């Protein structure tokens, strides 16, 4: 069984990098919404959350009060979060460990 101390640093760097990118895009989108400029599509925001940037998305939503009341968006966002957490949990199984280290 894989332990958290042996979890690949590349995965943690990937999640961290995607989170930083995602929070910056949330901030830019909020500014665009306030100034009437071109917006980032919701599909892009969801994709970033789905591929691992959801911690940054969650922080961006809180810091910028952005996308916090639009229920269809929130529903899809939480599906992305749960999917990510399920994937991470799976990587702690023997099949998931094999996937990470092959």
Image: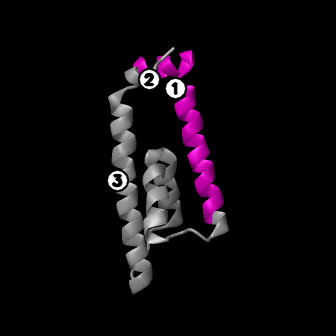
Magenta-tinted stretch: 73-102
CB within 8 Å, label 2 to label 3: no
**Relative to 48, 79 lies left or right:** right
Residue 45 lies in the magenta-colored region: no
- Residue 2 horizontal side relative to residue 71, left or right: left
Colour theme: one colour
Q: Is tag 2's residue or tag 3's residue first in the polypeptide sequence?
A: 3
Task: Find residue 67 and report its horizontal and vertical position in percent.
Answer: 54, 69
Residue at (66, 67) in percent of width and height: 71
Q: In which quarter of the image is the C terminus?
A: top left
Secondary structure found at label 1: loop
**Would you identify the image quadrant in which residue 27 lies?**
bottom left
Residue 30 or 50: which is nearer the viewer?
Answer: 30
The alpha-carbon separation of the residues under discs 1 and 2 comes to 7 Å
Task: Determine which residue is flagged by label 3.
Answer: 20
CB atoms of marks 1 and 2 within 8 Å = yes
Magenta span has 92? Answer: yes
Residue shown at 42% from the left, 54% from the top? 56
Where is residue 17 shown, x and y percent of the image?
A: 33, 46
Q: Residue furthest bottom?
A: 36
On screen, residue 96 above or below 27: above
- Tally of numbered discs: 3
Looking at marks 1 and 2 on the same chain, the residue that comes earlier in the sequence is marked by 1
Q: Is mark 3 on a helix, strand or loop?
A: helix
Circle 2 is placed at which residue position? 100
Q: Residue at x 48, y 64 (%)?
A: 62
Question: What residue do we see at 54% from left, 41% from top?
Answer: 84
User: Does 69 sit above or below residue 99?
Assistant: below
- Identify the mark at residue 91; answer none if there is no mark: 1
């Amino acid at each position: 069984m894989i332990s958290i101390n042996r979890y690949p640093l590349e995965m943690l760097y990937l999640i961290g990098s995607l989170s930083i990118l995602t929070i910056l895009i949330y901030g830019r989108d909020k500014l665009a919404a306030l100034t009437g400029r071109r917006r980032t599509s919701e599909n892009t925001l969801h994709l970033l959350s789905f591929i691992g940037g959801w911690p940054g998305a969650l922080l961006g939503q809180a810091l910028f009060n952005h996308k916090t009341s639009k229920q269809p968006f929130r529903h899809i966002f939480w599906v992305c979060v749960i999917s990510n957490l399920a994937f991470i949990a799976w990587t702690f199984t023997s099949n998931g460990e094999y996937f990470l280290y092959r």
